[in-house]
Amino acid sequence: MKKATFESVTATIPAGEVVYAIGDIHGRVDLLHELLTLIEQDAAAVGKARKTLIFLGDYVDRGPDSRGVVELLSTRLPDEFDAHFLIGNHEQFLLDFLDDPTWLDVWLRNGGEPTLLSYGVDVGGLERQGAEPGAWREAFREAIPERHLHFLRNLELQYQIGDYVFVHAGVRPGVPLDEQRRADLLWIRHEFLRSQEPFGKIVVHGHTPEREPVMRSNRIGIDTGAVFTGCLTALRLESGTRTFLQVAS
C-alpha cells in the first residue's frame, strides 16, 4: 500500500468534506478491497467531515472478477460514506449487449468474456454450440442478479463538487460541462487529453491508463491500469489539498 504526500493547490472542495475518487477497476476486486480498507483507515482520522466516494467507471471486463466488483459496490460499501457511481464505456458495452445481442462480438473483443465467466456463463459451451448472440444474451440475463442490473442501469454520467468535475473519459473542449454529449463523457481521448484550455472545473477522469496518475492544470487522470499493472489509484481531495492513495499487487 502507498500513500503519497499532500500537495497544496488553489482548487478546492467545500470545507468539512473529504472526497475519494477511484479509478478504473476492471474486475480487480482484490485491489478494490485493499484500496477501500486504505480509504477507511485514512477517513477515520478526519472526524466528522462528510466523506464521499466517487467511482469513475469501468468496473467490469478484462479482469477476473467483475461480478465481485459489482457485488461489493452495490451492497457492501462502508455506511459512513456517500457514494456516487459513474458509468464507463465498459458498462455501456455490457448494457448495449443486453439491449441488443448483436453487440456481442464488440463486447467480446473489448474484454467481455471474463465478465461472462465471472457470472458463471458457460462460454465454452456456447462457443462449441455455435450459439447465436441471442442465446448468449439469454444465458447472461439468467446469470446476472437483478440488483446488479439495477446498479448498472442507474449509473451517473458526471458528478461535480467544488472546483472539480468527475467523469469517466473526459470532456469535449469548447463545450460547457452541462452540454457535454454522453459519447464524449464515455469515450473521448485525444482531443481532451491534448487540450490545454480550461474546462470550467478541473476534470478528474479515468479511461486512459497510465503507469502513474497524470496531473495537468485542467485535468487529473487516475486510471493506473489496475488490470495491466496491478496498481489501483484513488485521488483524495480535502479543502485545497490533493493526495493519491494506491494499492498494488
Image: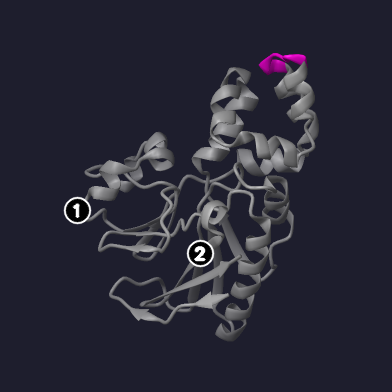
Asked if residue 219 lies left or right of residue 61, the reply is left
Please, what secondary structure does the residue beneath circle 1 have?
loop
In front: label 1 or label 2: 2
Q: Position of residue 209 (x, y in %)?
A: 43, 52
Identify which residue is drawn at 70% across, 23% down: 137
Identify which residue is drawn at 66% across, 72% down: 37
The circle on residue 197 is 1
160 in relation to 49, above or below: above
First in sequence, mark 1 or 2: give its number.
1
Quick one: which residue is furthest to the left in this view? 197
Q: Amino acid at mark 2?
A: Thr
187 in relation to 48, above or below: above
Please, what secondary structure does the residue beneath circle 2 have?
strand
- Residue designated by label 2: 233
The span shown in magenta is: 129-134
The reply to whether the magenta stretch includes residue 89 is no
Identify which residue is drawn at 77% across, 32% down: 121
